Amino acid sequence: MTEQLEEFRDALASGDPDEVNPVIEELKEMEAEERAELFDDAFEMCLELYEDGDGYQRQSVVRFARELAPRRRLFDVIDQAASEAELSDHLVPSDTTQALDRLEEFYLTALDDDDGRVRRAAIKGLKNLTVAYQMTGLGDRIDELLARLDEMIVEASGKKLEHIQQAQQDVQFSKGPTLKEMISEGLNDE
């Protein structure tokens, strides 16, 4: 796994799309359990590279971090998990709350970035995170996230303000019922 992390680090640090995109694709193809094992070390790597890079590198790091707990695989994991605790284990490592706290803080930092590409990547990350909150039974955290976004809006202007407002709209939208709840309601209506 150390070699794999070094490969990821080298590609992300290069800032070259021809190197970055294949490692993001490689991460996308990993099994959920494999990504969960990789989470702590890979996330630490992301934090280091984010602080040390230019706009494209920071954007690439945010995109990479998004794949550590990707939204498109959440539904597969939900179907396989026998309980909410097992679901959490599949999405992120053992301490779900701490991992989600770290991801949220990372995305909020990226949403405040001076580079619009980084902010757009963070918007998608926050959207994925709110889905994870809903699916792991932590929907109440969405209100806390909305409050943080409200605080950021006061300080923002221009394109940054627009991006924060977009993130806020996406998070607000996710407060509704989960897809599973909507399907269940639909079946009950029939």
Image: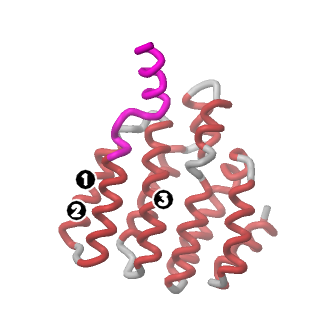
Dot 3 corresponds to which residue? Answer: 125
Q: Image height check: is 183 above or below 156? A: above
Q: Are marks 2 and 3 in contact (CB under 8 Å)?
A: no
Relative placement, left or right, of 151 versus 51 is left
Q: Which region is colored magenta?
A: 173-190
Q: Would you identify the image quadrant in which residue 73 lies?
A: top right
Residue 4 colored in magenta in the image = no
* Residue type, label 2: Glu
Q: Would you identify the image quadrant in which residue 122 lies?
A: bottom left
Dot 1 corresponds to which residue? Answer: 147
Mark positioned earlier in the residue sequence (2 or 3): 3
Q: Main secondary structure of the magenta part?
A: helix
* Residue type, label 1: Ala
Tag count: 3
Measured from the top left, where is residue 99 in percent x and y? 52, 51
- On the rendered image, what quadrant is the N terminus found in? bottom right
Dot 2 corresponds to which residue? Answer: 151
Measured from the top left, where is residue 3 in percent x and y? 81, 69
